[in-house]
Image: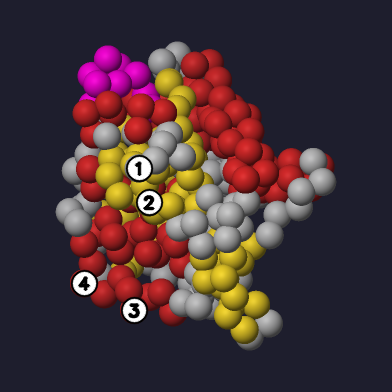
Amino acid sequence: MLVVKVGGSAGIDYDALCNDVATLWKSGERLVLVHGGSDETNRVAEALGHPPRFVTSPSGYTSRYTDRRTLEIFEMVYCGVANKGLVERLQGRGINALGLSGLDGRLLQGKRKAAIRIVENGRQKILRDDWTGTVEQVNTELLQTLLAGEYLPVIAPLACSEHGEALNVDGDRAAAAIAIALKASKLLLLSNVPGLLQDFPNVDSLITRIPASDVESYLQYAEGRMKKKVLGASEAISQGVGEVILGDARAAGCVSHALEGQGTVIA
Ligand code: ADP
């Protein structure tokens, strides 16, 4: 069992990714695909006159401030063009992909952070009307049912709160939660960088191996949204996923290259 998360930043080659995913699936590998959509969400938000706002928590994590309108735009892109773009590519390659978000069927149950603490210009502030959250539970039975029916699940990272609210959740950590729930042997977190760079953005500074016992100490090298990937990797590794690979999704063969150990391998 494999969980593949493909990012939504600029430069990702979704056709190449789907070629690889289709080949793997046809060879009998069972997998779940989780996706991003951040770049497209920024573009649509700008076009709709509600530009994105990124905020940083006191512990240094960056996230998209998700007021109600942003949540709607997030849904338009993630549940719309991003999810259906992947489903269509896979359908075109003969795979019966089925797209859904974590909200659907309570696939991902989460906890809302209605108020978030942020740091702005060196000062702490509380922001309300935020619709982000963290995944607390995965509906493993639903995923197993889909997989048993030969459907390839393509999942947009939203969650359903205990009150039935839609939440924007981090895609890397959602993929980690799914990998843990499915007892996946590998989790691939593919993005537009070769892996975790010790000296970002110098691509010659790729960290090729991280021992499972020491993932958190590598958080110091990650900036911005890369921190969530390392955090997700750490959560997955500490809860039974055999290997996490941070790899590049910008070229042909990206999934097979990551499986062969290209990128940052955490084990
Ligand atoms: P995606 O949406 O594809 O999942 P993100 O944009 O969330 O990807 O995260 C990947 C980004 O993290 C890279 O494009 C890069 O700008 C940034 N980054 C920050 N620090 C590092 C680092 N040490 N190594 C690699 N990338 C990093």
Q: Which residue is mark 4?
A: 213
The CA distance from mark 3 to mark 2 is 27 Å
Q: Is 247 positioned to the left or the right of 128 in the image?
A: left
Q: Which residue is mark 3?
A: 217
Q: Which residue is mark 2?
A: 111
Query: Residue 97 in the image: x percent, y percent?
Result: 43, 21
Pick the residue in front: 257 or 73. Answer: 73
Query: Residue 113 in the image: x percent, y percent?
Result: 45, 58
**Marked residue nearer the N-terminal end (1 or 2):** 2
Q: Amino acid at mark 1?
A: Glu
Query: Residue 257 in the image: x percent, y percent?
Result: 41, 46
Q: State yes or no: discs 4 and 3 in contact (Cβ < 8 Å).
A: no
Residue at the spot 22% in from the left edge and 28% down from the top edge: 141
Query: Residue 49 in the image: x percent, y percent?
Result: 82, 46
The CA distance from mark 4 to mark 2 is 28 Å
Pick the residue in front: 236 or 197. Answer: 236
Q: Which residue is mark 1?
A: 162
Q: Is 134 positioned to the left or the right of 201 in the image?
A: left
What range of the chain is rendered magenta? 144-155
Name the colouring of the figure: secondary structure
Residue at the spot 62% in from the left edge and 84% down from the top edge: 123
In the rendered structure, does residue 11 fall within the stretch colored magenta? no
Residue at the spot 30% in from the left edge and 64% down from the top edge: 234
Q: State yes or no: discs 4 and 2 in contact (Cβ < 8 Å).
A: no
The CA distance from mark 4 to mark 3 is 9 Å
Q: Name the secondary structure under disc 4.
A: helix
Which image quadrant is residue 146 in?
Answer: top left
